[in-house]
Amino acid sequence: MAIIGKPNVGKSTLLNAILNEEKAIVSEIPGTTRDAIEDTIVIGGYSFRFIDTAGLRASEDVIETIGIERTWEKIGEASIILYVFDATEQSFEDVTIAISELKKPNEGNPFNLVLIGNKADKLKKLPKGFKEFVEYETIFVSGKRKENIHLIAEHLVEVVRKSKTSDGTIVSNTRHYDSLKHAHESIVTIRQGLQDGVSPDLLTVDIHRALYHLGEITGVITTDEILGAIFSRFCVGK
Ligand SMILES: Nc1nc2c(ncn2[C@@H]2O[C@H](COP(=O)(O)OP(=O)(O)OP(=O)(O)O)[C@@H](O)[C@H]2O)c(=O)[nH]1
Ligand SMILES: [Mg+2]
C-alpha cells in the first residue's frame, strides 16, 4: 500500500495512525519525508505493507528529488495506492487532475486507487463533488485525531477479499498476471512431461520458457545457472 500525495497533506500522520506507532516524523514543514518508510501489519487476517513516501512536488532540493523519484517507483510497485489529499485545501477538481497525472505512466494497467481526504477534523462539511464520485472510493479521515482510520482498514480488507487469487496473492499488474499465467502453463507442461517420462532435452524448452516469463517480472534471466541447479538437484542429464 503506497501512501502518496502532495507534501504536508498528512501521509506520515496517517501511516502512524494506521500502525498505531510514531514510526514516521511528522512536521508542519512540507517535504519532511524524504525516504520511503514502511512497515507491515495484519488486518483482517491479511498482511499489508504500508509505505509512506516523499510528497509529490517539483523540488529544487537534490535529496528531496531523489525521494520523489522513489515515490514514483513505489507507485509502480504498489498493489493499492492510497492517495492522500488535504480536504481543507484541495478541491474535487484539484484531486481529479492529480489522479489523471498519476494514471499517465500507468496507462493500460489496472489502477487500484483509494482516495483519502485527510484533516477532516477541520471541515464543517464535506467538500463538493466527492459524494457523487463513483470511480474511486473516497474516505474522509483525521489522521491526527485517529478518526475513521478503521474505514480504511475495512475497505482494504474488502478489496483484497474481492480480488485475491486462490492462494491469497493479489496480482493487480496485468503484465505480471500475463507473465505468471504463461509461467504456470509451462510448469504444468513440465510436470506432465516428468510424469510421462519425456526426455530432459525436451523438458528444457519448457523450463527455459517458465524461467523467461518469471524473469519478465523479476528482471533476472539467468537461465543457465538456474537450469544447472535444477538438473543437479533432480539428477537428470542435460
Ligand atoms: N488538523 C489536522 N492536521 C493534520 C492531520 N494530519 C496531519 N496534520 C498536520 O499536517 C502537518 C503535516 O503532516 P505530515 O504527516 O508530516 O504530512 P506529510 O504528508 O507526511 O508531509 P511530507 O512528509 O512533507 O510530504 C503536520 O503539522 C500535522 O500535524 C489531520 O488529520 N488534521
Ligand atoms: Mg511525511
Image (spheres, rainbow, N blue to C red):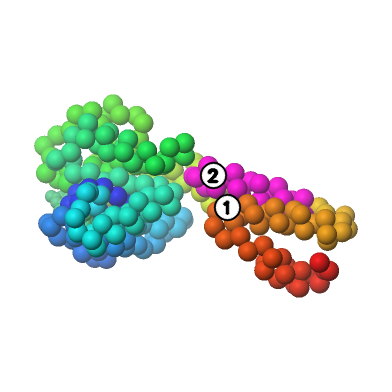
| Magenta part, dominant SS | helix
Instruction: State the image coordinates of residue 171 (x, y, percent, origin top left).
Output: 52, 47
Residue 42 badge: none
Please give the name of the residue rendered at 66% of the width and 57% of the height, measured from the top-left corner: 211
Instruction: State the image coordinates of residue 207 (x, y, percent, origin top left).
Output: 73, 57
In this view, 47 is above or below 131: below
Q: Earlier in the sequence, mark 2 or mark 1?
A: 2
* SS type, badge 2: helix
Residue bearing the label numbered 1: 216
The amino acid marked with disc number 1 is: Glu
Please give the name of the residue rendered at 63% of the width and 46% of the height, measured from the top-left corner: 181
Mark 1, residues whose alpha carbon is within 10 Å: few (<14), some, or many (≥20)? some
The amino acid marked with disc number 2 is: Arg
Please give the name of the residue rendered at 44% of the width and 43% of the height, measured from the top-left corner: 159
User: Which of the 4 image quadrants contains residue 226?
Assistant: bottom right
- View quadrant of ligand 1: bottom left
Q: Is residue 1 left or right of residue 93?
A: right
Residue bearing the label numbered 2: 175
Instruction: State the image coordinates of residue 90 (x, y, percent, origin top left).
Output: 18, 38
Q: What stretch is highlighted in magenta?
A: 171-191
Instruction: State the image coordinates of residue 53 (x, y, percent, origin top left).
Output: 29, 56
Is residue 50 among what the camera can see?
yes
Please give the name of the residue rendered at 27% of the width and 43% of the height, measured from the top-left corner: 116
Q: Is residue 189 magenta?
A: yes
In this view, the residue in front, 132 or 71, is 71
Q: Is residue 94 magenta?
A: no
Mark 2, residues whose alpha carbon is within 10 Å: few (<14), some, or many (≥20)? some
Q: Distance between the residues labelled 2 and 1?
A: 9 Å
User: Do the CB atoms of the residues marked 2 and 1 lie less than 8 Å apart?
Assistant: yes
* SS type, badge 1: helix
